[in-house]
Image (cartoon, rainbow, N blue to C red):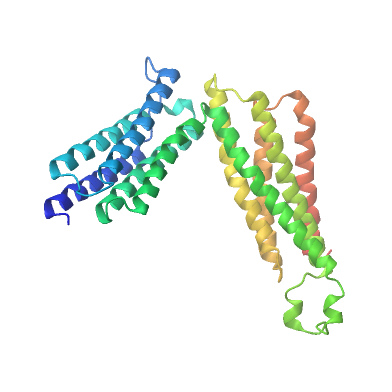
């Protein structure tokens, strides 16, 4: 059984990892690109330290794969190796300046945080469980996976923003598809309640849309479809015109990512609030949120370097579709 000194060694180490996690969380990055900073060297150094974390995790896990457990001196040496790589990870990560792109920094930061947290969990598992436990092996694999995520990281802000769009397009697609399917299923069930003798049940009626409700939902779907088209067009615009070579290009990519991350949740909230019993005041508010988010993104794309003269036709079409569906929705909500 581990003695008191052994326990103190592990608890001190885990406390140090917590400090590393805090440092990563608080790291804002330099506002300006430091003299001599080179992306190629940064990526090379970051890749090496990700790999080193994986290597140290393997050494640590192998040392505790069977009895007897390493001595306190051996334990301290192993943990010092791990700690050194984690500090190196923080140091390299902090070198990436904000001018490289806030979206890029955020995604790298998340990968670094996750890797350190996986290492902390491995340390806790080795400390508290029997040597060579299945949980230890599984958690070692989690550190390896976290290390391998380096190869999936976006290499610049354009790739980082494209990833944001790739994540949010399916979310809006799903919201549109699920609401469309629910509406179609409702229409397919017409007459079933009467057949079952449930047509006079007030509780049953609360679970179905009225004809006016269905009209409301059609315009909600119109707004969501506008969001869906907007995100897909934005993704194409980033692919074609995204530019990381200028400060303006980087900033506009970050601005778009922020708009997208605000838009997607509003769509989800609108889709979620229209299920029966439909409350008009809630629908009106959630729809207004979607319209505002759509409008902001459309205006931004219209004025940004991400769209050119040939894109203005679809930009204007989406602007009009957004306004049209909202006006029709408000009319349906007021029964006019």
Is residue 291 at least partly visible in the picture? no
Q: Is residue 159 above or below residue 182?
A: above
On the rendered image, what quadrant is the C terminus found in? bottom right
Return the x and y of residue 187 as percentages of the image width and height. 84, 66
Between 224 and 82, the one lying in front of the other is: 82
The answer to whether residue 188 is above or below residue 249 is: below
Residue 226: x and y in percent read 74, 45
**Number of numbered labels in the structure image:** 0
In the picture as drawn, the residue positioned furthest to the front comes out as: 67
Q: Nearer the viewer, residue 67 or 135?
A: 67
Which residue shows up at 83% across the image and 70% down it? 189
Please report the residue visible at 58 percent of the width from the left and 46 percent of the height from the top: 262
Residue 71 occupies quadrant: top left
Instruction: Please state which of residues 266 and 328 is positioned toward the viewer in this rendering.
Output: 266
In the figure, 129 relative to 298: above or below? below
Residue found at x 60% / y 51%: 265
Which quadrant is home to the N terminus?
A: bottom left
In the rendered structure, the answer to whether residue 187 lies left or right of residue 162 reads right
- Give percent across and percent down for residue 13: 22, 45
Q: Nearer the viewer, residue 131 or 95?
A: 131
The residue positioned 32% from the left and 39% from the top of the image is 57
Query: Where in the figure is residue 72, as x and y percent of width and height?
Result: 14, 45
Q: Quadrant of residue 74?
A: top left
- Asked whether the viewer can see residue 288, the reply is yes
Q: Residue furthest top?
A: 36
């Amino acid at each position: 059984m581990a003695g008191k000194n052994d326990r103190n060694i592990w608890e001190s180490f885990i406390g140090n990892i917590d400090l590393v996690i805090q440092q990563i969380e608080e790291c804002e990055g330099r506002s300006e690109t430091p003299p001599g900073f080179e992306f190629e060297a940064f990526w090379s150094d970051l890749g090496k330290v990700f790999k080193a974390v994986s290597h140290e995790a393997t050494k640590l896990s192998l040392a505790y794969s069977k009895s007897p457990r390493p001595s306190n001196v051996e334990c301290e040496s192993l943990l010092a190796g791990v700690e050194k790589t984690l500090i190196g990870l923080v140091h390299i990560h902090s070198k990436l300046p904000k001018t490289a792109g806030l979206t890029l920094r955020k995604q790298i930061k998340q990968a670094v945080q996750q890797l350190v947290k996986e290492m902390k969990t491995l340390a806790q598992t080795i400390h508290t469980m029997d040597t060579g436990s299945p949980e230890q092996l599984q958690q070692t694999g989690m550190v390896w996976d976290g290390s391998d995520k380096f190869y999936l990281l976006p290499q610049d802000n354009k790739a980082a923003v494209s990833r944001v769009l790739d994540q949010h397009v399916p979310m809006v697609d799903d919201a549109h598809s699920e609401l469309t399917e629910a509406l179609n299923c409702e229409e397919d069930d017409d007459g079933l309640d009467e057949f079952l003798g449930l047509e006079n049940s007030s509780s049953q009626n609360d679970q179905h849309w009225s004809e006016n409700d269905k009209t409301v939902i059609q315009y909600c779907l119109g707004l969501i479809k506008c969001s869906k088209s907007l995100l897909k067009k934005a993704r194409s615009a980033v692919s074609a015109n995204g530019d990381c070579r200028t400060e303006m290009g980087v900033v506009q990519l970050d601005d778009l990512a922020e708009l997208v991350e605000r838009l997607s949740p509003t769509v989800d909230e609108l889709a979620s609030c229209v299920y029966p019993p439909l409350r008009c005041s809630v629908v009106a508010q959630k729809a207004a949120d979607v319209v505002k988010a759509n409008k902001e993104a459309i205006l931004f794309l219209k004025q940004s370097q991400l769209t050119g003269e040939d894109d203005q036709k679809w930009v204007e079409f989406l602007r009009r579709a957004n306004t049209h569906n909202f006006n029709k929705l408000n009319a349906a909500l007021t029964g006019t």
